[in-house]
Image (cartoon, rainbow, N blue to C red):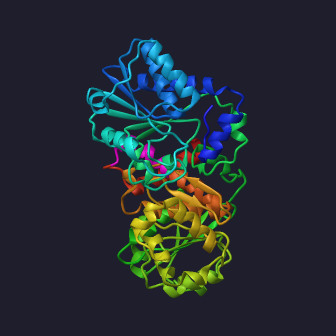
Amino acid sequence: MTGRDIYLASDIKSMDESCGVSSELLMENAALALFRRLEMLGRLKGNICIICGKGNNGGDGYALAVSLLKAKIGVTVFSVDSPSSPLAVKFKKAYEDLGGEICRDIKEAINAADTVVDCIFGFSFRGTLEGANADAVRTINDCSAFVLAVDVPSGLTADDTRLPPLAVKADCTCTFTALKPALASYPAARLCGKIYIEDIGIPEEVIKRHAPFAAIADERLLALLPERRADGHKGTFGTLAALCGNAETCGAAYLACLSALKSGVGMVRLYTDVPCATVTKARIAEPIISDNCTAKAILSQRHDALLIGCGCGRTHDDTIKKLLLEAKASIVLDADGINCIAGDIELYRSVNPETVITPHPAEMGRLVGKSAEEINSLRVESAVEFAKKYGFVTVLKGAKTVIAAPDGRLCISLTENTGLAKGGSGDVLAGLIASLLAQGMNSFDAACLGVYLHGAAAERLASKKGVYAMLPSELPEIIGQIMYFG
């Protein structure tokens, strides 16, 4: 059984120890899983070189070598250090008893290999690589062979999403039981390549006894969709007020409104400048459009949620600030709405518990006085810290988007689709989350479901058109289809 969410190393260790399956059988299962993965990848050919450390990760490598020898597949093993764990000692002996040899020259072994299997350190590693271990990793990284890392690339700390000074750069990683934080968020995930979660026999009930570090944004979130009552009307499905767009960014207003409507909201009132109002009326018929963008005008109307900031520029800063302080409805704050409060964020701490803020790394950096690079070096920590401090549900956009709640709940999307790296994608996401809020969802659930739907639609679109050709304007139609058909 494999977990559907992300777990800390301590929880994985507890699962291993309490699952009722012997450590030896778990290691044999791990070796079998690795063998099967190599087979599926078409790597059971040529020369396979396994680099083994002294602990149980090395034991997995020796056990894999035993399986390869029994299948009469060419394998070479290099021991970075003498085995110290009883199971590593046992499986190394089993390998040698079958006639397997331990290579004395790592460079010779790796240079002759078509596939290198990294079994130096697993999820229990802490600290920095040194000595022979560091030399082995450098040799792996310098080779031209296909590199498969076992559990985590050696040098990564499983719970740490930062880039270490030195670690294996893998073409793929076979991790056991469940994802660990380092595999699920950048920048550490940059070293992992394609990730496969391998089942080694941990029972489902054992996994469920452990609270995950973070949930994965996946199709399970569709169960949170608001009821679509057969006798409903436009008021039943919520009213969204959107302060979006200006003369130069009419597309942002259009995309946000289109996304909100395609994802089920009953009514959209768009507040925007005269030029944008004129253009948007010609492009989309459904919203009620007003060029009276004062806070008084917006607050005078009944609405279930507010969308603030998509392409609205900085001419409405006073309106935005007043809306944030006085609006009772749920809020999505995006783009220029975020930039508006970047200088005095303290004024808006926890003013509305149902506010979702959707910054990209540069916008998050402006909010907290850091560079985009600093934010991206600690994506999970940045989102969690901001959410807890300021009381906003925080959606830190980018590859593997992070969603953090003020109460500590955390969700990570595994989507990393470069087709979304186009102007307008964020407007679609903001309109989608705002639509879900207007339909009655709470802020964290709406943010998680919105991010999942946005990513899932992007993956479907990319599979049809490719990441170069897909457009943000094509996402809302697919989002609505996923919501209805799954």
- Which quadrant is home to the C terminus? top right
Magenta span: 455-467
Depicted 252 relative to depicted 472: above or below: below
Foreground pick, 273 / 430: 430
Residue 399 in view of the camera: yes
Q: Nearer the viewer, residue 200 or 325?
A: 200
Residue 461 is one of the magenta-drawn residues: yes
Is 160 drawn above or below residue 300 in the view shown?
above
Q: Magenta region, mostly helix, strand or loop?
A: helix
Q: Is residue 335 visible?
A: no
Q: Residue at x 40, y 68 (%)?
A: 372
**Residue 330, image x, y percentages:** 64, 70
What residue sits 34% from the left and 28% below the top?
A: 115
Q: Which quarter shows the N terminus?
A: top right
Q: Position of 238 compared to 198: left or right?
A: right
Quarter of the rendering containing residue 459: top left
Q: Is residue 304 magenta?
A: no
Residue 364 location, x and y as percent?
47, 70
Corner quadrant of residue 411:
bottom right
Residue 52 x/y as whole percent: 44, 31
Residue pictured at 34% horizontal, 25% vertical: 103
**Where is residue 207 shown, x and y percent of the image?**
68, 38
| Residue under the point 34% across and 42% down | 135
Q: How many marks?
A: 0
